[in-house]
Amino acid sequence: MLAFGPRIWYIIHPFPAIDQERLMKNVLITGASSGIGYALALELAVRGCRLFLLARRKEQLEMLVKEIDQPSVDHQVHICDVSDLLHIRKVSAKIQQTAHIDTLILNAGVAGGGFDPLNMETEKIARLFQINFFGSIAFIQEFIPQMVANGSGIVAVTSSLAGYRGMPKSAPYSSSKAALNTFMSSLRIDLLDTGIQVTVISPGFVKTPLTDKNDFYMPFMISAQKAAKIIAEGLESRKNEIHFPKRLSWPAKIARWIPEIIWIRLMKDRR
């Protein structure tokens, strides 16, 4: 009973009081040059956030700042290749010299469908993990100490419903997102009582330049603008996971409980 008591305390113990006015003041977004990142930047700018926009394509970021059209706000643009850990460290240091980042939205990622187990290319898989997993971890490493020292902040990563279970022809992509999910789940435990909100964003199909390349049926697809509103509201509500659209995400959650042998039979015709 004595051993069980502390566990009950942590379940019912409220999180520390958070300064809501500051929580999403300075927001860093990776992968901001297109898709969800681009739409989310527009949405958060309207909500009064100062943005630090990162991507490889400078011209797209500058176009985004022009579209935001807020000359009185010092939104910043930084070129960053999230596959380069040294570059991440340099860009992070530069940003921290000018501002305290309150919210990290680690959105950069690449798709990885069409996987063929008979023609695996380890180098391509490693690069996919470098971008989808290690790129996010590197930013967390750089900014978490400052957030903990200030006792507040949000760390959010864009994962995928495909990270819930193994999907046909998607072994590298699904596993990179599953690794990200598990990392964030553990991080949430480790940062308990620090004032840091750890959030996983799990979208289904969102119309972006990435999904435009897909040649298969994508049910319940939503616009990037709608996805951005859902994400912004979820972050403001301090949700542990923001999953959407619900017509797809809830069945995907339930599917995690399906026995493996049945799951294989359900998926075999989708190969």
Image (cartoon, grey):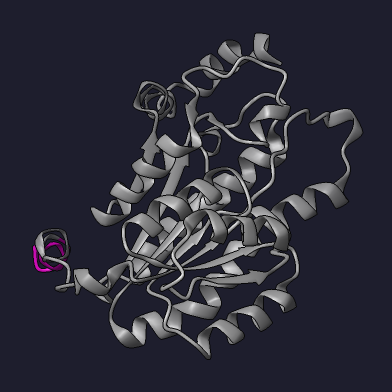
x%, y% of residue 190?
A: 37, 70
Image height of 187 relative to 33, above or below: below
Looking at the rendering, in which quadrant would you find the N terminus?
bottom left
What residue sits 56% from the left and 65% below the top? 53
Q: Is residue 211 above or below residue 44?
A: above
Count the marks: 0
Estimate the x, y position of residue 197 in percent, counting from the top left.
32, 64
Outermost residue, top side = 269
Q: Quadrant of residue 186?
A: bottom left
Residue 14 lies left or right of residue 232; in this view the side is left
| Residue 122 magenta-highlighted | no
Q: Nearer the viewer, residue 72 or 100?
A: 72
User: In the depicted view, which residue is nearer to us: 213 or 175?
Assistant: 213
User: In the rendered structure, does residue 4 fall within the stretch colored magenta?
Assistant: yes
Image position of 70 with respect to 46: above or below:
below
Nearer-the-camera pick, 119 or 128: 128
Q: Using the rendered view, name the quadrant where residue 100 is placed.
A: bottom left
Instruction: Determine whether, in the image, residue 201 is placed left or right of residue 212.
Output: left
Residue 182 seen from this side: no
Relative image position of residue 58 (x, y in whole percent) = 71, 63
**Residue 144 drawn at (x, y percent):** 45, 77
Q: Residue at x 66, y 13 (%)?
A: 270
Quadrant of the frame with the C terminus: top right
Residue 227, above or below 233: above
Q: Residue furthest bottom?
A: 97
Q: Which residues are magenta?
A: 1-7
